[in-house]
Amino acid sequence: MKKIMTAMLLTILSFNSQWLAAHADHGFINAGQAQAIALSMTKKLSLKDLGYSVGKLDASWRKISSENITVLPSDSGKHQVKVNNPANNNSIIVSISATGDVLTVKAAQ
């Protein structure tokens, strides 16, 4: 009976440690990751309207590269990324949470 209880306890503990290890890599994104997220979002928005204030962007936004993206200084805990489109001289600002969720996409002023 003691061996069964010990085995059950070890099994339960191993499930908990695997769950913790599987979730240990979640955390805050850095500026490079924010830049990649903004680039991906810009290309998605050139395909369809995802409900952000900019609506669907024209096809020229598909040609944006990382050279056209600037991570703006922010002390609010989220990343503000400016994406410039040299083809039409327009810019958008992508706000990204510290965990990588896109919060807003709006026209730059």
Image (cartoon, rainbow, N blue to C red):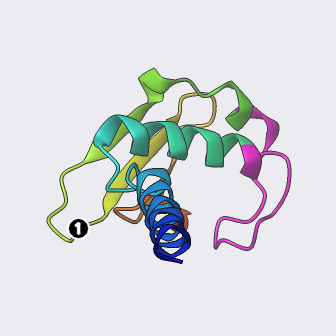
Q: Is residue 96 above or below residue 40?
A: below
Name the amino acid, label 1: Gly
Task: Say above or below: 38 vs 1.
Answer: above
Q: What span is colored magenta in the figure?
A: 44-60
Residue ID for mark 1: 77
Q: Main secondary structure of the magenta part?
A: loop
Please name the residue shown 55% across and 64% down the image: 105
Looking at the image, residue 51 sits to the left or right of residue 104; the answer is: right
- Which one is in front, 18 or 30? 18
Residue furthest left in the image: 75
Residue at 54% in and 78% down: 1
Disc 1 secondary structure class:
loop
What is the x, y in percent for residue 20?
42, 60
Using the rendered image of the protein, determine whether residue 31 is visible from the camera's viewpoint. Answer: yes
Q: Is residue 50 magenta?
A: yes
Q: What residue is shown at x 53% (from left), y 45% (from top)?
A: 37
Q: Where the C terminus falls, by quadrant?
A: bottom left
- Residue 11 versus residue 17: which sits nearer the camera? 11
Whether 91 is drawn above or below 87: the answer is below
